Amino acid sequence: MPKRWVVPIILTSVLASIVITILLNKSPSFEELVAQNLTFGEWVEAYDDAKYGSDERKLIIQKMAEGATEFAQWDIVREKAGYDSDFDDLAVQNMALTAQTAKQWHRLMTVTYDHELRQTAVAKIQELCASFEDWQAVYKISSWSSGSSEYMAEMSITKMLETAQTFEQAQFTFSRLSNRSEQYQAAVTTMAKLAGNYQQWNIVYEAAHWQDRDTRNQALAAMRNRADNFEQWKIIYRHSERDSPKRVEAVERMADYAGVFLEWADVYTAIPDEHELKQIAFVLMDQSPLPFDMWYDVWTTHGSKKVKSLAFSKLSKQAHTFDQWHKIWQNSPSGSDTESMALAKMQEFSTASP
């Protein structure tokens, strides 16, 4: 064979091979695809691959509808078909026929404007939800869903309060309400029914509106029966009415648990001047072995003038360096005796320095 024919023959063979390969591996035509017995999921993939707005997509929707048997599948048919499609009503009707859970009925409520169907969905949700956890799940769905979510969220709040069996459940429900909500008082009442320990009753006290004296008094009485440390009695003191015997009693109980300077300072500040604990608290503060820096913090931050005066007397005895007196000078009121004393001490150290 002449050499000039070798290359064309080789090229012709290669091209023929490529054509054969393409023919053997080509994608099936749409007609062939429609004729196949695909699963629902495969039809969904085919729909996603088809061109937007094409006749192919409309035909695939029909195939999806023919194969749909479950709620989730009918929901996909409705979503792919669109609200204006002939398949929308069909999908919604079949969603109603296949819905079995409260979550599914709630989903149905968000995709239909049919009043009768929405009422049926509400009734089904009420029928299927029996526990707090059931209604909590509905509430959480309603919190991020569209459609009738606000209505269902309010219903869920009511039902959660009715089915709550623990304080934590009632508190969860309460935490979802604003203080202007119509259900606010019902939530506080439910928490009060389920409260057991000190912390829970304190939450009830702080949650109750200031004009709800009955609930507040109930909570405060429960807190008094359960308080067993300084901080708890301090909170009771703050909640108690000013100048009342109960407020003084709270300070007395604070004194029973006081052990460190700041606790005795709180007792000293809170107790009436004529009470015997006033002097006792001051003596115990005076005897507290605090270092310079702690006395300095008391002097600069405490609200009681007498406590601040005590702290300064301790500072003046413990200050032995220029830097310590400089700190006192920096925080002394301009023109005050403390400023003059600090400045004089600083000058003594400066003079004594080589």
Image (spheres, helix red, strand yellow):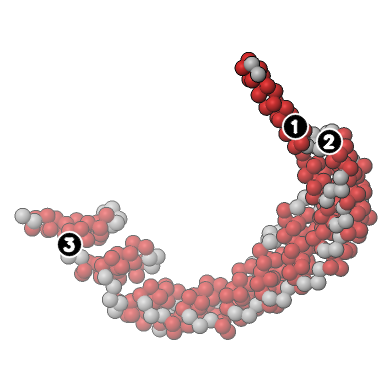
The residue at which mark 3 appears reads as 321
In the visual, does 331 lie left or right of 255? left
Q: Secondary structure at mark 1?
A: helix
Crowding around mark 3 (Cα neighbors within 10 Å: few <14, some 14 to 19, many 20+) is few
* 80 or 310: nearer the viewer: 80
In the visual, does 234 lie left or right of 330? right
Name the amino acid, label 1.
Ile
N-terminal of the pair, mark 3 or mark 2, is 2
Q: Are marks 3 and 2 in contact (CB under 8 Å)?
A: no
Give me the disc on residue 20: 1
Q: Secondary structure at mark 2?
A: loop
Q: Does residue 333 lie above or below 233 as drawn?
A: above
Measured as percent of width and height from the top left, residue 109 is found at 85, 54
Q: Does residue 92 lie above or below 6 as drawn?
A: below
In the image as oriented, which residue stretches furthest toward the left?
354
Residue 275 appearing in the image: no
Q: Quadrant of residue 126?
A: bottom right
- How far is mark 2 from mark 1, CA to CA? 17 Å
N-terminal of the pair, mark 3 or mark 1, is 1
Q: Does residue 347 lie above or below 188 as drawn?
A: above
Which of discs 2 and 1 lies nearer the camera? The answer is: 1
Measured as percent of width and height from the top left, residue 65 is found at 89, 48
The residue at which mark 2 appears reads as 29
Quarter of the image with the N terminus is top right
Name the amino acid, label 3.
Thr
